[in-house]
Image (tube, rainbow, N blue to C red):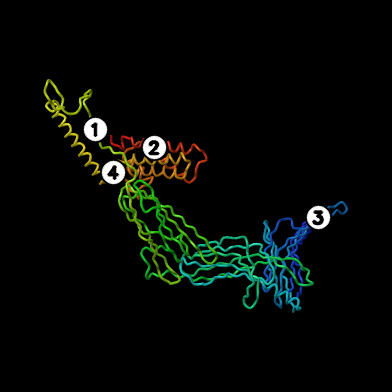
Amino acid sequence: MVTSISRLIYILICALAFVGTTLRAQTIQVEAPQEIEQGRPFSVTYAIRDLKEDVSPIPPKYEGLELLYGPTRNESSNVSITNGRVVSSSYVAFTYTFLATNRGSFTISGFKLARPSGEPISAPAHKLTVLASTSGAKNMSRMSRGYLYRTVVPRTSIYVQEALPVSYKIYSSTSFGVLDAKAPTYDGFISQKVEDTGRTPILREDYQGTSYQTAEIIREVLFPQRAGSLTLPSSEITIQIPMELEGDPFLGSMIERKLVTSPVAINVKPLPEAGKPDDFSGAVGKFIVNAELSSQSARTNEALTLRYRIQGVGNLKIARLPNLEFARELEVYDPSDETEQTSDGTTVRATRIIEYSIIPRHTGRYTLPKLTFSYFDPTSKSYKRVATEEMSIRVAQGKHIESNTPVVRSSTIEGDTTPYGLTNKTGASEIKGLSFVSSWQYPASYIGLMVLFVAILMLIRKRIALRADVLGYSASRANAVANKRLRLAKQYLDKNQNSQFYEELLRALWGYMGDKLRLPTSELSRSNVREHLERHSVEPELIDAWCATLDEAEFARFAPNASSDAPKQLYQRAVEAIAKVETSKKLTGK
């Protein structure tokens, strides 16, 4: 019984000893001065021994002091053997470097070590007193406070979509190096970045009575997207500065400092409703427009290029353009629309180009639509409208198109070599051909000529009526026009002019379906063509072949294939696709 009690006491003593050791290992020691001179940097170290798990520091609170850098982590371990017994110990320390800029009593508290296995380990608070500084320390204090990071804007009240230049500048009383700069994330703004030239000039500037070295770290132009009060958020920068106080242990070393800008409130005014035009584009700034035409005179079935150009200061990417109405006799393809914007940090210059490809199908004189562009000018606080000059083209007949009108050719009697005129026959003079007039063949040929004349007259009237029906005439000429485009595409292919080849090939495919199905250009789309072909009960495999050829041509136009045989194969498939649709009994009604 005594033995059992002794054993129990021994186990209890060992357990208490282990718990005591663990508790001691999880106590954080604070190493810091009790007194410090004003303007002097000092260190606070939090150390813990024999900790068997990984920890992460939770920074302390230090109101009235300035953190220069930290924490730095230092770890060490020691293994010793005494009387055959192995004893190991470890040490982990986290050091923060502060600057005391004001006199008085201060408390550093709240430092903890977070553990994955339980509650954090807390360090005791540390109190210190900041005494009056020497003259050298005062100089150090002034030097340490000579760093600013500001958000610079020319104004804080603007209109919606008006350009707002923003500059994030650092002000330094000594030399410095930028380690990291974080651009802010904006809410309610669209940002136009300024192209980085890789060089940031350092200039001298006076601010609030002090001369600084300044540098623009971030430059951009913002466009507010909604009215109301918006905020430019804080931006953070990390710099490296020298420690230059004579007699200081940090002499000649570099320290890191983080600087943060203050948020800036921006009042965004809505655009006025008074005077707003119905066709307002939404653009704010100042713009001009002009139009260019590749040629003032043209021929039927030959392509023209109409280019509208909008230029100015402002954001053109959000601008809405009016719908332009072209004459039905002009085949107009979907326009290309490209916008290029650049910024020098104070303004955004934009150029927007809208380009149309036009093919006139009939002769005559046609007026091209004017491009009218309305915008809001924040300088004059009014809406303005600019427009291109009126342009027209004269279309002449292009290359001769084969005529299907029958031609009557004259003939002579086979084997007759007698000169035209009088001949002697059985001793009498006779007019040549008089016997034919007196025979039954004469009235029969007369009737035949009358029938032929009526047929020609009906054919001419039919062609006149067909020409009056623009869509019907285009449908009847769809295959001929497509073949002409294919021949032109073949010429480009033979010359290895792939860009012109793909463009003409697409015109052949789209133009054929538009003419054959009597669809205006505005309704010409892949889904619409498929729907009309299916309505005519055209064979599905023919529809799929045409669509596949069109897709491959459009893809190859913007991403050319490396194979030199690909354009030739694509050309052959396009010829076959048009030919098969043309001979389809469902579409021709035969």
Query: Which residue is under mark 1?
Result: 409
Where residue 50 appears, as percent x and y from the top left, is 77, 58
Marks 1 and 3, the one that precedes in the sequence: 3
Q: Which residue is mark 4?
A: 473
| Any part of residue 167 in sight | yes
Discs 1, 3 touching: Cβ within 8 Å? no
Q: Nearer the viewer, mark 3 or mark 4?
A: 4
Q: Which residue is mark 2?
A: 577
Query: Who comes first in sequence, dot 4 or dot 2?
Result: 4
Residue, disc 3:
88
- Lateral position of residue 509 relative to residue 130, left or right: left
- Residue 278's tag is none
Find the distance from the CA under tag 2 to the CA under tag 1: 38 Å
Q: Please tell me which residue is depicted at 23% across the width and 29% down the height of the picture.
A: 411
- How crowded pointer 2 is (Cα within 10 Å; few <14, some 14-19, many 20+) is rated as many
Q: Who is closer to the viewer here, 19 or 549?
A: 549
| 141 and 219: which is toward the camera | 219
For residue 393, which quarter of the picture?
Answer: bottom left
> For this view, does 514 lie left or right of residue 67?
left
Q: Residue 290, how many percent across, how many down? A: 41, 60
Disc 1 and disc 3: Cα gap in Å?
122 Å
Query: Mark 4: which secondary structure?
Result: helix
Residue at disc 1, secondary structure: loop
- Image quadrant in which you'd find residue 466: top left
Sort mark 4 into few (<14), some (14-19) or many (20+) by Cα contacts within 10 Å. some
Amino acid type, label 2: Ala
Of residues 203 and 97, the one nearer the viewer is 203
